[in-house]
Image (cartoon, rainbow, N blue to C red):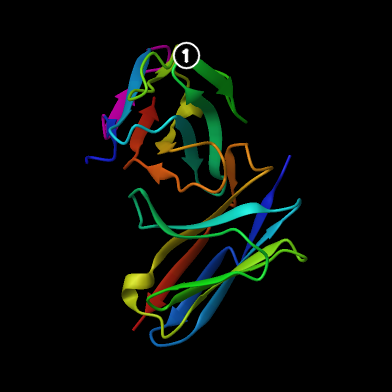
Amino acid sequence: NAGVTQTPKFQVLKTGQSMTLQCAQDMNHEYMSWYRQDPGMGLRLIHYSVGAGITDQGEVPNGYNVSRSTTEDFPLRLLSAAPSQTSVYFCASSYSIRSSYEQYFGPGTRLTVT
Amino acid sequence: SQELEQSPQSLIVQEGKNLTINCTSSKTLYGLYWYKQKYGEGLIFLMMLQKGGEEKSHEKITAKLDEKKQQSSLHITASQPSHAGIYLCGAGNSGNTPLVFGKGTRLSVIA
């Protein structure tokens, strides 16, 4: 199993550009989520999904869209990039949202918005 | 919403020394996770604690969960340079909500 994969690893955008961060898992996990990590802020939840066709907002959803058309994929879209979205983005998956199940994290995407 | 406070924020220890990192929750804990992150890399799962009083060990790392205090501690015995990194605790608001994370503890181990 490849686990949780994220592409790209690095990305530089100009303010106002849009892009999609890709996340895929091959473990047949129902639960997937996106976090951003900023210095001194820890991990903050952006959006999450408990299954195909179901998504919900996390703590910091503004400026981001998600969709879950398949179990395997959970892309994160930046509609109009802003410097405040410069961060490291992590995708995670788990068998279930229930806290008794381990979450697996991808390697991250480092995004810089100029 | 639940908040997790980690202490200390950063720690520098000499190789071979023991150390403890704490994670305190503002609400009842429903599962407590410990992850390690090497600088610039992803999160590596260390262990998960579910029940009050539970204690788990992996190599030289031991984690305990004190349900009454809403706190977990991570103890590293005889620290090594390979232990350096950022340690993050995560927990759920209830049994069915996404994990929230503490801000992390940055550990440096010097020879």
Q: What's the magenta region?
A: A8-17
Up the image or down, B102 lies above or below A111; here it is: below
Query: Residue B88's x, y, as percent?
Result: 51, 56
Between B83 and B9, the one nearer to me in the picture: B83
> Who's the residue at 68% across and 42% down the image?
B94
Circle 1: is it few (<14), some (14-19), or many (20+) Cα within 10 Å?
A: few
Using residue B66 as the reference point, say whether residue A99 is left or right of it. Answer: left
Among the 4 quarters of the image, the one containing residue B77: bottom left
Q: Position of residue A50 (x, y in %)?
A: 51, 26
Residue corresponding to mark 1 = A53
**Horizontal and vertical percent for residue B56?**
50, 71
In the image, residue A53 sits, relative to residue B33, either above or below, namely above
Res. B55 image quadrant = bottom right
Chain where mark 1 sits: A
Q: Is residue A83 visible?
A: yes
Q: Residue furthest left?
A: A1
Amino acid tagged 1: Gly
Is residue A113 highlighted in magenta?
A: no
Q: Secondary structure at mark 1?
A: loop
Q: Residue at x 34, y 40 (%)?
A: A106
* Residue A17 drawn at (x, y percent): 37, 12
**Viewport quadrant of the C terminus of chain A:** top left
Q: Is residue B41 left or right of residue A59?
A: left
The residue that appears at 46% across and 48% down in the rendered structure is A102
Quadrant of image for the N terminus of chain A? top left
Residue at the spot 58% in from the left edge and 19% down from the top edge: A62
Specify whether residue A14 is painted magenta: yes
